[in-house]
Amino acid sequence: MSQIRIMVNGQAKQLANETSLLGLLQALDLDPRLVVVEHNRRIVRRGELGSTALADGDAVEVVHFVGGG
Amino acid sequence: MTTAVAAPVDPPFAIAGRTFRSRLMVGTGKYRDHATMVEAIEASGAEIVTVAVRRVDLDRRNEQGILYHLDPRRFFLLANTAGCYSADDAVRYARLAREAGFNEFIKLEVIGDPETLLPDTEGLLAAARTLVKEGFQVLAYTNDDLVTALRLEDAGCAAVMPLASPIGSGLGLLNPYTVRLIKRRLSVPVIVDAGVGTASDACVTMEQGVDGILMNTALAEARDPVLMARAMRLAVDAGRAAFLAGRMARREVAVPSSPTTGLLG
């Protein structure tokens, strides 16, 4: 399979097989230092983003800090 | 000759062993623009600044993130779990916030009712116990209820944050008695969170002897947030000083301030 379908922040995305989480952030133009990534409900440390590969059906949440009280 | 009046001795304000200069903490939500927010925070003198954890909007990119506008080296970022309606959700948000890498502090909110945003105290206690076990310094947003406050302290919370009135209501301190009681009975810092609407509310709240106040809407929704931030800073200082000074007794009858002797015959 050359393409995988994953969910990122509730949106369906089509990606090349074996894309890493770091690759996903780069594709989304997001700075890995300013976001936190949850992969299938497990938090992935920044240092492990490059070595964590995505698979078909994965769910990813990318969060950051916004204004709040 | 003038003599300088010695300022009352105020013990340093510390949460979980970390000392802070300002007893005023501010939120970063609902400002009309980022420049006003930053200027208001500067004017407030606050060191602790709260932020929320949310999904990155994939269509709008980075600039929406608060760290593009607020220098995290200048402020102590206190992440919250606002918007969470269960202990599990709050724990999930807290873990994500910690992974951002700033500190172990979390302002824990578990909301039980969407109209009043009053806390779900059962969920709050459950989440607090889990997070304390995981090494978080938990600052728990709660009702002005003594028993819940005591249980949160027992659970190992670093601070307990009773409300003055519901979040964003601006109704001021509705129950000074319960807030005073909580402060008297707890050993951990008591920080009033939510409900302060204007400077007099902040002053009266600090006069109860609490350790600090956290506010957001009172600044963000003021006509002039920067000026209101300055007013709040002065009010918090005034209320703290008045508490330390110790107010006069209340009397039901008048007592003249001028001599009752030497009146004309």
Image (spheres, coloured by chain):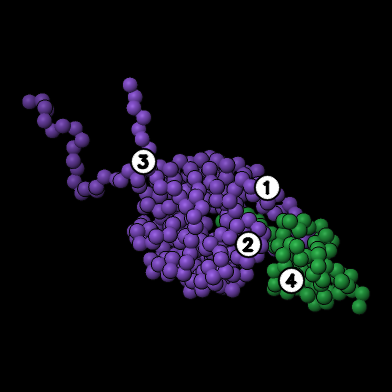
Chain colours: A green, B purple
Tell me the quarter of the picture where residue B259 sits: top left
Q: Mark 1 or mark 3: which is in front? A: 3
Label 4, on which residue? A39
At label 2, the amino acid type is Arg
Residue identifier under label 2: B98
* Discs 2 and 1 share one subunit: yes
Callouts 1 and 4 on one subunit? no
Within-10-Å neighbours for mark 3: few <14, some 14–19, many 20+: few
- Report, in whole angstroms, how far the alpha carbon at label 2 lies from the one at label 4: 16 Å
Q: Is residue A15 left or right of residue B50?
A: right
Marks 2 and 4 belong to one chain: no
Which residue is at 82% across, 71% downward? A53
| Badge 4 and badge 3 both on one subunit | no
Q: Chain of mark 1?
A: B
Q: Kindly identify which numbered label has been placed on residue B8.
A: 3
Numbered disc 3: what chain?
Answer: B
Among numbered discs 1 and 3, the one appearing first in the sequence: 3
In the image, residue B224 above or below residue B121:
above
- Residue at the image point whose x is 79% and y is 69% from the top: A52
Residue B28 horizontal/vertical position (percent) = 60, 52
* Residue matched to label 1: B69
Q: CA distance from mark 2 to mark 3?
A: 37 Å
> Residue A43: x and y, percent?
69, 69
Q: Chain of mark 4?
A: A
Q: Secondary structure at mark 4?
A: strand
